[in-house]
Image (spheres, helix red, strand yellow):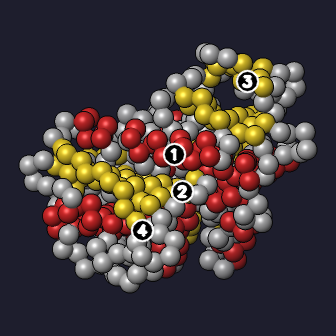
Amino acid sequence: MKYVIIGGDAAGMSAAMQIVRNGDNPTIITLEKGGYYSYAQCGLPYVVGGHISSTDKLIARDVETFREKYHIDARTFHEVDEIDPQEKTVSGIDLKNNERFTVNYDKLLIATGAEPVMPSWDGTHLKGIHTIKTIPDIQQLQEQLTNRVKKATIIGGGYIGLEMAENLVDVGLEVTIVEQQSQLATIFDEDMATYIHEEAGKQGVQLLLNESVQAFEGTDRVEKVITDKQQLETDLVIVAVGASPNTRFLKKTNLHFHPNGAIIVDPYMKTNVEDIWAAGDCATQYHRVKEKNDYIPLGTHANKQGQIAGLNMTGKARAFKGVTGTSILKFFDLTLARTGMNESEAKDLQLQYDTIIGKTLHIAGYYPKPKPLHIKMMYEQKTNQLLGAQIIGEEGADKRIDVLSVALYHKMTIDELEDLDLAYAPPYNGVWDPIQQLVRRK
């Protein structure tokens, strides 16, 4: 059986390893557009900040390991631009040799990920304007972090924007975030975002909200960011306005797509076309709380979906159980965590809901150095079923958001949260956990 996988990162290589372990003497060809395999993209901002010493630390398995130890025909700099499902072939360009190639497959996995969005602003060709997605992106950025670079402008206040803001401050830059919405981190509700804004101000990050970028100016390098309100002098720009599924090369196929371009898959990662699977940031994820397909591109989902795809491609049936929309982010001294839906998503689904909002302490109040936790939970009015939660604080948000993610997975009510048997000792918790304290205030 000949397996072809397009994409050599999280989803693609998770699938490849399952095929190695479970396939019957398989032939596996992986086609990667770049030069690196299996690396932790989520760690890239922390290389810039010096918290991780080198991009080499992010590589889980290099291409030679896949070739020599696992006997995978792992190809680099092979960009696929065409799939023929009838002939069962994959074609593209060998970027090193500038030659076209074609390989045939018995079973195909599309794991092409997502690519950063770069709007069609004037001046995007100037040096000093970067997106953050790959190891070469970070290497190019680091090369430009010279003594002459003092001011950095980040376009976009989402996860990448916030992480890059922190890490650029850590290396001594003056940082400004330009966000066209009225708040940073729009996956959080507006009332919770106020804590993020306060932390940005505390750390010296300038926020320009409700402001839209229109162009960049400079001679050879970027020197100014032009918005609808002003001109900003800058030495460096990070564009972090979102990611788009890397599926444009598939538009001539009969694959079914989500409105945003992601490939629609079933619980077994199968597409609507025979012998083609898809996984990771180029595919949809089923949202257990919304009860519909969604698009939440995260490394956790990519690895799980890749594993599921690989198992099913070898005939070992296993379903992907879906996601609850859980994510977490470090922003200077704060941890920002959420799971399930926010209020905007609940309104889009026309749900009738109520919220509980409050501040608690992450450990017993009498134990030294307790830290405040700001918690918001949302539940359905009629059933009391938990719909979502957001937690922001210096300590303890990670533990609680995982508890609430499990509660969402099992469709628990907020009343049932009070009955959970959660670990207690003064250095770790109060006798009532913060989420239980909040539920008792309902």
What is the total number of numbered labels drawn onto the structure image?
4
Q: Name the residue beneath numbered marker 3.
A: 232
Disc 4 or 2, which lies upstream in sequence?
2
Mark 2 vs 3, N-terminal side: 3
Identity of the amino acid at label 4?
A: His
User: How much space separates mark 2 and mark 3, taking CA atoms?
Assistant: 28 Å
Q: CA distance from mark 1 to mark 2?
A: 8 Å
Q: Residue 64's x, y, as percent?
A: 73, 71
Question: Which of the two discs, 1 and 4, labels the residue nearer the N terminus?
Answer: 1
State which tag comes first along the sequence, 1 or 2.
Answer: 1
Residue 314 appears in the rendering: no
Q: Please, is residue 218 above or below residue 205 in the view?
A: above
Q: Residue at x 49, y 79 (%)?
A: 21
Q: Position of residue 418 (x, y in %)?
A: 20, 69
Q: Is residue 434 left or right of residue 96?
A: left
Q: Amino acid at mark 3?
A: Leu
Q: Position of residue 264 (x, y in %)?
A: 36, 45
* Rendered-image quadrant of the C terminus: bottom left
Alpha-carbon distance for marks 1 and 4?
18 Å
- Check if mark 3's residue and mark 4's residue have beta carbons within 8 Å: no
Nearer the observer: mark 1 or 4; the answer is 4
Q: Earlier in the sequence, mark 1 or mark 3?
A: 1
The amino acid type, in three-letter code, at marker 1 is: Ile
**Where does label 4 land, which residue?**
362
What residue appears at the point 46 percent right and 41 percent down from the top-left corner? 194
Q: Which mark is residue 334?
A: 2
